[in-house]
């Protein structure tokens, strides 16, 4: 006990010490003292304190490998099967009665150590060992079902991310036997169904048609199985979006149906899904809102592109549909794109305007283009539609001149700071024209590079 007392004192000294004031040295000393106490009596009642505090102290100095060794040693000795059985059932030959309180306490500390070991391996980037620990936790019947379910799902996620389908499925089978809730079952079923899609989405996967077809089949089956279960709306959204992307990549025109399914699933998720502390539906957050915005935009953009000609009435209808996307889906990826597309509709009609209408139309067009660019700059959005807007603004700087561009730009509300107006400097957008060479007066230094978005 003397060693434990000294370890506690040193641990407290390390905890309250200022950074840089020998703090790491104190942590290491405390870790070593607790480790020595653990080695002296790894199965005693004081062992959890020695193990957990020693490992914690080592982690404060980045020595995760030492912490892992501590957890492993503690689990091996403190979790001895014979000892746990004796506490649970007693041992008549030794005159020992069952001790359910001590048994529950020991199992609890053992579970904490397993959790910490899995986390330590993960923090040390040893995902294989981390998955194995979680799989082991899931298989230990002494632990509560809730703990085992969480561990099984963690193992599934890690094994799937490492491309180990058989091990992921083994953890899935363990989870299924633990009476998962409907949401837990849907989550696990989706992880299994999404395996090939994740593989297809990875490096080089999109060029493999067999993998794409297998991935589509898995997600379609999942979607059909869960489509009438509102509590599974998030997984239905992800499945529908994944199928749509794969079908479009493969040239299958049925992708339109799956983009429509994506929008419907998102609407269901928004209506029935969870909400944050601020009352905001989680469906309005990325990436889920991005899926719905992409689906809505892709269907509308295709309709616009396929039109043989554009009338003012058509352009107005499409512009209102684009405004619906902007107002419905707060997606930092797709809102700027939809706004830029509004600008391009006005741009396409410019040659049909009468002189008296042209100024108002140009003001609206430039306003949409610059709004899209400002939003894209803030959110580092490099979609081709944004690049196209930048090119058109450079073109219209030449056509309209700086005076008119200044009038239109400074008359536009700043989308990032709504109480302000945008500012304009001569040639502001012309300078960003791809391939344009700026001729400098003699004697001036070369310009600084344009700051990337």
Image (cartoon, helix red, strand yellow):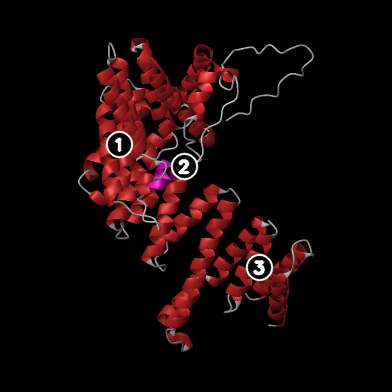
Question: Residue beneath label 1, please?
Answer: 240
**Disc 2 versus disc 3: distance between alpha carbons?**
31 Å
Mark 1 vs mark 3: give the one in front: 1
Residue 451 versus residue 308 in the image, above or below? below
Question: Residue beneath label 2, please?
Answer: 161
Q: Quadrant of residue 275?
A: bottom left
**View extreme (front): residue:** 356
Q: Earlier in the sequence, mark 1 or mark 2?
A: 2
The spot of residue 344 in percent (x, y) is 39, 20
Side (left or right) of 437 relative to 152: right
Which of 150/379 is in front? 379
| Magenta-drawn stretch contains 168 | yes
Q: Earlier in the sequence, mark 2 or mark 3?
A: 3
Which of 221/308 is in front? 308
Disc 1 and disc 2 in contact, CB within 8 angstroms:
no
SS assignment for the magenta stretch, majority: helix
Part of the protein shown in magenta: 160-169
Identify which residue is drawn at 52% across, 32% down: 422
Residue 239 versus residue 428 in the image, above or below? below
- Using a 10 Å C-alpha cutoff, classify the residue at mark 3 as few (fewer than 14 neighbours), some (14 to 19) or many (20 or more): many
Side (left or right) of 280 relative to 451: left
**Disc 1 versus disc 3: distance between alpha carbons?**
48 Å
- Regarding residue 132, the answer to whether it shows in the image is yes
Residue 224 versus residue 409 in the image, above or below? below
Which of 209/47 is in front? 209
The spot of residue 101 in percent (x, y) is 44, 82
* Total marks in image: 3
Q: Quadrant of residue 77?
A: bottom right
Residue 54 image label: 3
């Amino acid at each position: 006990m003397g060693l434990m007392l000294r370890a506690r004192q040193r641990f407290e000294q390390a905890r309250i010490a200022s950074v840089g004031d020998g703090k790491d040295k104190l942590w290491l000393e405390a870790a070593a003292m607790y480790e020595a106490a653990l080695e002296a009596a790894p199965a005693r009642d004081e062992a959890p304190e020695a193990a957990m505090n020693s490992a914690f102290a080592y982690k404060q100095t980045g020595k995760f490998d030492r912490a892992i060794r501590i957890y492993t040693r503690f689990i091996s000795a403190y979790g001895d099967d014979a000892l746990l059985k004796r506490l649970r059932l007693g041992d008549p030959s030794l005159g020992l009665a069952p001790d359910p309180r001590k048994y529950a306490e020991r199992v609890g500390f053992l579970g904490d150590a397993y959790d910490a070991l899995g986390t330590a391996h993960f923090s040390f980037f040893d995902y294989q060992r981390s998955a194995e620990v979680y799989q082991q936790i899931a298989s230990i019947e002494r632990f509560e079902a809730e703990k085992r379910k969480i561990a099984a799902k963690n193992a599934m996620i890690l094994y799937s991310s490492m491309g180990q389908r058989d091990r992921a499925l083994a953890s899935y089978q363990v989870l299924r036997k633990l009476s998962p809730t409907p949401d837990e079952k849907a989550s696990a079923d989706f992880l299994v169904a999404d395996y090939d899609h994740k593989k297809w989405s990875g490096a080089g996967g999109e060029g493999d048609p067999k993998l794409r077809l297998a991935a589509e089949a898995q997600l379609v089956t999942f979607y059909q199985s869960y489509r009438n279960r509102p509590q599974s709306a998030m997984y239905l959204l992800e499945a529908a979006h994944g199928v749509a992307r794969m079908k479009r990549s493969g040239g299958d025109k049925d992708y339109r149906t799956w983009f429509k399914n994506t929008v419907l699933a998102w609407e269901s998720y928004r209506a029935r899904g969870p909400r944050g502390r601020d009352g905001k539906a989680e469906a309005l957050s990325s990436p889920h809102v991005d899926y719905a915005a992409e689906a809505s935009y892709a269907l509308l953009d295709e309709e616009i592109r396929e039109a043989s000609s554009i009338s003012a009435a058509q352009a107005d209808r499409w512009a209102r549909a684009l405004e619906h996307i902007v107002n419905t889906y707060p997606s930092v990826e797709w809102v700027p794109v939809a706004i830029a597309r509004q600008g391009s509709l006005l741009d396409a009609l410019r040659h049909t305007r009468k002189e008296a209408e042209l100024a108002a139309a140009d003001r609206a067009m430039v306003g949409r283009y610059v709004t899209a660019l400002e939003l894209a700059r803030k959110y580092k959005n490099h979609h081709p539609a944004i690049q196209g807007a930048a090119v058109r603004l450079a073109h219209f700087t030449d056509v309209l001149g700086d005076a008119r561009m200044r009038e239109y730009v400074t008359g536009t509300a700043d989308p990032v700071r709504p109480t302000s107006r945008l500012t304009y400097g001569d040639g502001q957008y012309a300078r960003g024209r791809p391939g344009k060479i700026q001729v400098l007066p003699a004697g001036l230094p070369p310009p600084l590079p344009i700051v990337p978005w």
